[in-house]
Image: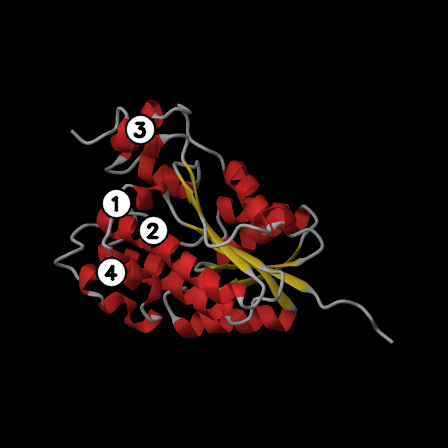
């Protein structure tokens, strides 16, 4: 008689530094399904994790397409029980148009939360990587908050507040997408909770990754460097520091935490609202 427990699967969407850092802390003894829009990125990250002793499978996924996310869910379930989800995929303001940012960062996240929320197991947990940018968007109305949190996924991009005459540039699209991520996670925490699972967001500041380097050398680079200089920490963060918070939120020590957003930006947002970075 075989009493062996089913394999627990940790799904990592976005094969970048932050997703890997969290995965390294929560995936020992579990199977990692590492998915990215670019297969070569997933393969490179899988090689690194495999050489560090992790059991890894790769997949290609486009989070802006429901069929692609559903295929990833099916692959995860073919490997075992979905115990953890680390959603770290996205595009930045310097990388994409407002339309693409809303489709990938806002709609794509809502889609991932819905599809994996249908299969996450009792005791499981998830992390969505949002951004400090969501904390610099001015307050939204109660109705707007509810719309971003609760609108059915396939109707989300039709909201009046997300139309081109309202969202005119990539930075605004990014800010509202990341605010939407934290609101969506709060609402999804209710549904995930009925399955005995938890879901939270982490809103990092400037973390040194390839995406951040694009920003630091892009058209907004001077502004990003000023953020670092004016922050209490006086430096950028590292993926490992995000990994520490991810490990807390996905582990036993975080069992009382769900539907929450953790801002970790070295004090940039504090300086934006109440310090040297405050708008004049």
Where in the figure is residue 26, as x and y percent of width and height? 63, 50
Q: Is residue 12 visible to the viewer in this orientation of the structure?
A: no
Q: Secondary structure at mark 3?
A: helix
Q: Residue at x 31, y 28 (%)?
A: 271
Q: Are marks 1 and 3 in contact (CB under 8 Å)?
A: no
Write the residue at 33% across / 23% down.
229
Give the answer, above or below, for where 42 lies relative to 215: below
Residue 110 on image: x %, y %: 39, 63
Secondary-structure class at tag 4:
helix
Residue named by callout 3 = 271
In the picture of the structure, the residue carrying the numbered disc 1 is 137
- The quadrant holding residue 213 is top left
Q: Position of residue 42 (x, y in %)?
A: 52, 56
Residues under labels 3 and 2: Cα distance?
19 Å
Q: Is residue 4 above or below residue 229?
A: below
Mark 1 Cα-neighbour bin, 10 Å: few <14, some 14–19, many ≥20: some
Of 9 and 245, nearer the camera is 245
Q: CA distance from mark 4 to mark 1?
A: 16 Å
Q: Is residue 2 visible?
A: yes
Q: What is the spatial separation of the Cα atoms under label 4 and label 3, in whole angstroms? A: 28 Å
Q: Are marks 2 and 4 in contact (CB under 8 Å)?
A: no
Q: Is residue 15 left or right of residue 134?
A: right
Left or right, 70 with respect to 197, comes to left
In this view, 261 is above or below 220: below
For residue 178, the mark is: 2
How crowded pointer 3 is (Cα within 10 Å; few <14, some 14-19, many 20+) is rated as: some
């Amino acid at each position: 008689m075989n009493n062996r427990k089913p394999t627990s699967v940790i799904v990592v969407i976005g094969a970048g530094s932050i997703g890997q850092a969290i995965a390294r802390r929560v995936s020992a003894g579990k199977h990692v399904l590492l998915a990215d829009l670019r297969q070569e990125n997933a393969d490179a990250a899988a090689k690194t994790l495999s050489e560090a002793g992790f059991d890894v499978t790769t997949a290609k996924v486009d989070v802006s397409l429901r069929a692609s996310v559903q295929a990833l869910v099916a692959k995860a379930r073919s490997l075992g029980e979905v115990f953890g989800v680390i959603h770290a995929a996205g595009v930045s303001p310097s990388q994409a148009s407002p339309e693409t940012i809303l489709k990938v960062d806002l709609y794509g996240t809502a889609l991932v939360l819905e599809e994996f929320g249908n299969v996450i197991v009792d005791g499981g947990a998830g992390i969505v990587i949002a951004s400090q940018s969501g904390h610099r968007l001015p307050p939204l109305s109660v109705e707007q908050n509810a719309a971003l949190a609760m609108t059915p996924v396939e109707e989300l991009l039709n909201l009046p507040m997300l139309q081109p005459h309202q969202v005119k540039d990539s930075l605004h699209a990014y800010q509202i997408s990341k605010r939407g991520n934290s609101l969506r996670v709060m609402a999804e925490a209710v549904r995930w909770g009925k399955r005995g699972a938890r879901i939270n967001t982490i809103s990092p500041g400037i973390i040194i990754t390839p995406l951040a380097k694009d920003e630091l050398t892009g058209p907004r680079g001077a502004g990003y460097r000023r953020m670092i200089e004016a922050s209490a920490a006086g430096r950028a963060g590292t993926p490992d520091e995000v990994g520490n918070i991810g490990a807390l939120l996905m582990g036993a020590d975080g069992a009382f935490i769900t539907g929450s957003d953790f801002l970790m930006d070295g004090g940039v947002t504090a300086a934006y609202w109440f310090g040297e970075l405050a708008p004049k």
